[in-house]
Structures are given as C-alpha cells and as structure tokens.
Amino acid sequence: MKAAKQGTEKSRKSTTAAGKKPARFTDEELAAMREHIQEMKADASGGRRADKVEGESAVLAKIAALPQPDRAMAERLHAIIKANAPTLSPKTWYGMPAYAKDGNVVCFFQSAQKFKTRYATLGFSDKANLDEGHMWSTAFALKELTAAAEAKIVALVKRAVS
C-alpha cells in the first residue's frame, strides 16, 4: 500500500519550476495590503457619517505625497471625478486614491511608483457600470492628461456611476 501511495503523491519541490523559488508577494504588494488593513480598521471604527470628510482628507494627503507627474494627474482626476460623479465618496484603497459608492470602490488611481510601473493607471472595479457586450476595458494607462483624455475620462466616470 505504501508504495502505491508514494507514486500518487507529489512532493512540494516537484510542483515548482526547476531552480525557481516559490512566488511571494513583493514589498510593494505587502505594503499595499498593510495599508488596506489599516483602511478597513478605520472604516469599521469611523462609521459612514465621517466617510466623505475623512476620505477626502486621506485622498488629498495621498495625492500630495505623490511625485510629479503623477501628482498633477491625480489632482486633475480628483477634480474631474468630484465634478462629474458627486455621488462618489473619496477614500483610500490599498493606499491609492479611490472613489466609492455605498462603500464599494468604483474607480481608483494607481501611480506609476506604487508598483514601479512605467505609467499610472485609472482603474474601475466590477461595481462600475462599464459593461459592454462580453468584454470591456476596466483599466487605462495614463502617461499624460490631454484634453482628449480628460473628455474620455469624464464619459467613463459618468457611465460608471449611471
């Protein structure tokens, strides 16, 4: 019996690629998870009444801490979202500026430095009303906010909350 059992079991080593370490979270991912835990604790203790004021302060502080050009883009996105989707409440989400409806994140801004990528990202969650057929975009790379890009963002944000 023991011989038959050994043949069907795989050791942990045999399931990883030869010579490669098992995957683990990056330092940036771990930091984002720690931030998210702090955000959840703050949400649980603060209640919904303080959401908009405290959320706005937290988002503005995160934006102010960003390096250029991401700071300028985040400031402009914040203004666009507030003007075109006033029902969304600013909050931080995994340490990023985000905007929520009924406590659920609808969209967020991820700076290029957050995970050391070459561009910033405007992302939408599954709570955003962007469905279009069987496939649609939920994240957009941002290198610069032009007038044309801003017009597209306004349309996306309005559609996301419709």
Image (cartoon, rainbow, N blue to C red):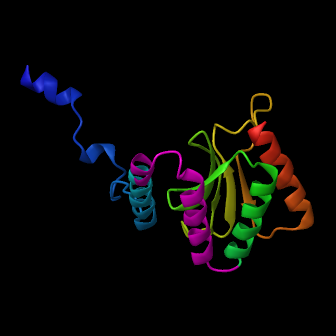
Is residue 132 depicted above or below 124 in this figure?
Answer: above
Return the residue nearer the eye: 21 or 72: 72
* Foreground pick, 7 / 28: 28
Q: Can residue 55 be found in the magenta stretch?
A: yes
Please identify the residue farthest to the front as the structure is shown.
Answer: 49
Reply above or below: 69 against 148: below
Q: Is residue 29 left or right of residue 5?
A: right
Q: Main secondary structure of the magenta part?
A: helix
Q: Quadrant of residue 15?
A: top left
Residue range (magenta): 42-68
- Where is residue 137? Give x, y as percent: 74, 44
Residue 15 shows up from this direction: yes
Where is residue 43 drawn, in percent x and y? 45, 49
Residue lying at 72% horizontally and 62% vertically, measured from the top left: 78
* Residue 14 screen position, x and y as percent: 28, 44
Counting every numbered tag in the picture gives: 0
Residue 113 in sight in this render: no
Front position in the image: 25 or 34: 34
Q: Quadrant of residue 38?
A: bottom left
**Foreground: 159 or 11?**
159
Query: What residue do we see at 60% from left, 39% from top?
Result: 102
Q: Quadrant of the C terminus?
A: top right
Seen in the picture, residue 43 relative to 71 is either above or below; the reply is above
Q: Classify the position of the N terminus by image quarter.
A: top left
On the image, the x and y values in percent for residue 70 come to 68, 73
Question: Looking at the picture, does residue 35 appear above or below residue 85?
Answer: below
